[in-house]
Amino acid sequence: MTITPLMPVYPRCGFRPVRGEGAWLISEDGSRALDFASGIAVNLLGHGHPHVTQAIQEQAATLMHVSNLYGSPQGEKFAQRLVDTTFADTVFFTNSGAEAVECAIKAARAYHQSAGSERFEIITFKNAFHGRTMATISASNQEKMHHGFSPLLNGFKYVDFDDLEGAKAAINENTAAFLVEPIQGEGGVRPASDEFMKGLRALADEHGILLVLDEVQCGVARTGMLYAHELYGVTPDIMASAKGIGAGFPFGACLATEDAARGMVVGTHGSTYGGNPLAMAAGNAVWDVVANDEFLEHVRTIGAKLRAAIEQFIGNYPALFTGVRGEGLMLGVTMTHPTRGFVAHLRDNHGLLTVAAGDDTLRVLPPLNIDESHIATFIEKLSAGAADYEIPAS
């Protein structure tokens, strides 16, 4: 037998972490790496955060899972906190970001079809990443995710990101919603413009369609706001959240206004594990830490310092780097060539973990509770990596 026990769908590297301490990961061979990838924006409080760890431990010893056929005091508590701190009136809990986006897609279609309309088409934006399920890969135009899985699901129309006129032109009698990341993550840490986000909201209102946001990566304090749409002064109808919401525990949420959720009635959707007590304990612990002005101000302040340090540094290497973009602690360093080789070089030779993204972008996604000492270490390792990196021949 030649296939590996773990299905070989990931090109796994030689770094094999077995333990984490704050912003550091420790491999089984004892080597340490500064984790400025955070499990791709998941471990938003680093590794082994005492409050989150204690909450999970205590809940695991009490009750881990029951069916959603029963009442859920744990789920009701966290759902109420989300309602109290966001635009939403109601929440459905999932196990992942892809499931949260799936729920958002279903809710958007159900909104129209429950009222007798046949609207079903969702306008999405090129280079987006919404997940790996059939619906979420169909919602993206990225052919690398489509290969081998045809036929895709119909009902999605792709428009250039940040192109308001293109979005307007794509609307027709079948349009049900826009689905957009306020800041594209996998697509290269590309923030939408104010004009674009406000324009989508206005178009949705004008045409009686919904604005659905995918904040799986950019949400939960990552940008220095609880959710990134607050940067634009725009309120969605439906929003998908995940990644940092559990600080490493896998779960997500689909949030909606009462009106937008009008089609999601008994029997229309479900999840065996979604909203289990263990996930809710993690979510409540995360909200204890992040959902306050002091923490969000910390993210904005430390994010500005990290960005300034990177901007000052990259001027020394114009052959490698071209700029920095993003918000808070969701930053992208644009490069002059494909990024994966440099990511591997930093990891393997300098103990620094980052993430490659589209548009030749190096994603910098540290835990949100880093301090200036972590920034200094990051710049030191990034500088050493840039100094001995050989740009591959084109």
Image (tube, rainbow, N blue to C red):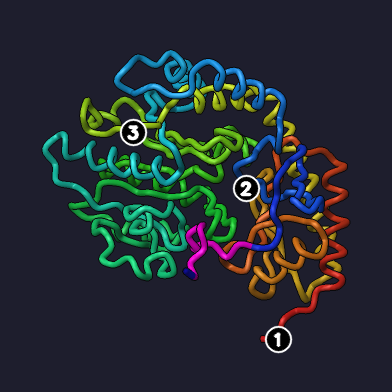
Q: Which disc number belongs to residue 271?
A: 3
User: Dot 1 corresponds to which residue?
Assistant: 393
**Alpha-carbon span between mark 3 and mark 2:** 24 Å
Q: Amino acid at mark 3?
A: Ser
Furthest toward the front, the residue is: 1
- Given residues 17 and 201, the one toward you in this image is 17
For numbered disc 1, what is the local secondary structure?
loop
Is residue 247 positioned above or below 59 on the image?
A: below
The range drawn in magenta is 2-12
Choose between 91 and 341: the one closer to the eye. 341
Mark 1: few/some/many CA within 10 Å (<14, 14-19, 20+):
few
Q: Residues within 10 Å of mark 2 (few under 14, many from 20)?
A: many
Q: Tell me the residue at 77%/56% (across/down).
A: 352
Contact, mark 2 vs mark 1 (Cβ under 8 Å): no
Q: Quadrant of residue 69?
A: top left
Of the numbered discs 3 and 2, the one sitting upstream in the chain is: 2
Q: Which residue is mark 2?
A: 39
